[in-house]
Image (cartoon, rainbow, N blue to C red):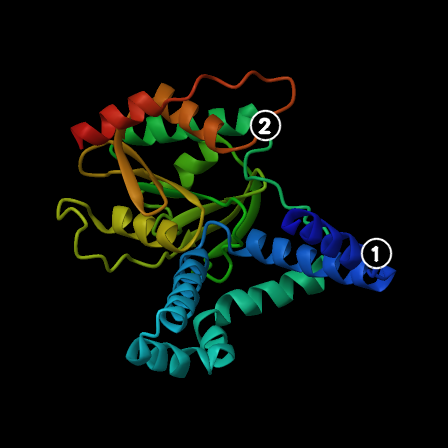
Amino acid sequence: MRTGGGIGRVVEVLAGLRPQDVIDILLVAFIIYRILLIVKGTRALQMLIGLAILVIAYVVSQVFEFFTLHWILNAFLSSIILVIVVLFQNEIRRALAHVGVNPFLSTRVGPVSSAQVIEELMKAAVSLANKRIGALIVLERETDLEDHVEKGVELDAVVTKELLQSIFLPYSPIHDGAVVVREGRIRWAGCFLPLTTRPDVDKDLGTRHRAAIGLTEETDAVVIVVSEERGAISVALNGRVTRDLDGATLRRVLLNLFPRPEGQRRPKPARKRLRRAEARA
């Protein structure tokens, strides 16, 4: 009887839906989806999860009558709009700018538009490592990096091994800082990245690695680091650094992280080799 009554109520609710209600639900779902796409891969997603946990704790404290906890959470959540504005001011600004440029569909693609770009990145990293020339190459993914890096010289150039080598030569005027690759092209050179403030970072890691960790903590970018002292190649992702990669492993990592070019076969995942490299580090 209860099951039948429940089904009956559901049918009654569905029968009472107006076309405006359906459109309203779809619009709200689309807005939530777009918000999740914007915050994906950033610290904002972690903060959203934290707020969700607080809301769950608020409900639990109300149900089980934890009066003190409920009072504290109620005082905090009563000004939730202000909290959201303060916590997500950068993301809100970026979202509004994104809506102004492209209100409905995103046309952003990954930084790798062909296997040739990955090949050039790999060759450049290996060549620079062999010559013990330090380098920092940032590959933009979904998160727009304009609000996260201090932009240097605008280039908008094709990704080639020779160009990357010339940028990072010690006597080049733009060798300091990082190169940012966006949509398969070198967008900026001489950029400065935010340094990580984590106390647990390995003391052996220099400024380049700390900058790579700092940027990947805040965004979903991938950063290739070439150590000047050790002549070693590392990849930073999600606030973690995988060190001592060879050219073949670097190629596989990049092909697994970015969209597969049409007509190209994706190599097998290099997770086992990544784990071995992390263990050596």
Residue identified by numbered label 1 = 15
Q: Using the image, determine if residue 234 lies above or below residue 38.
A: above
Q: Residue 50 at x, y = what percent?
A: 39, 62
Residue identified by numbered label 2 = 114
- Give the amino acid type for the residue marked by disc 2 in the picture: Ser
In this view, the residue in front, 8 or 56, is: 8
Which residue is at 43% across, 68% downward? 59
Which residue is at 69% across, 61% downward? 28
Q: Is residue 97 left or right of residue 86?
A: right
Q: Using the image, determine if residue 50 lies above or below residue 169.
A: below
In this view, the residue in front, 279 or 65, is: 65
Question: In this figure, what is the number of numbered marks?
Answer: 2
Local crowd size for mark 2, using a 10 Å CA cut-off: few (<14), some (14–19), many (≥20): some
Q: Residue 104 at x, y = what percent?
A: 74, 55
Disc 1 to disc 2: CB gap under 8 Å: no
In this view, the residue in front, 77 or 66, is: 66
Q: Is residue 134 in sight in this rendering?
A: no
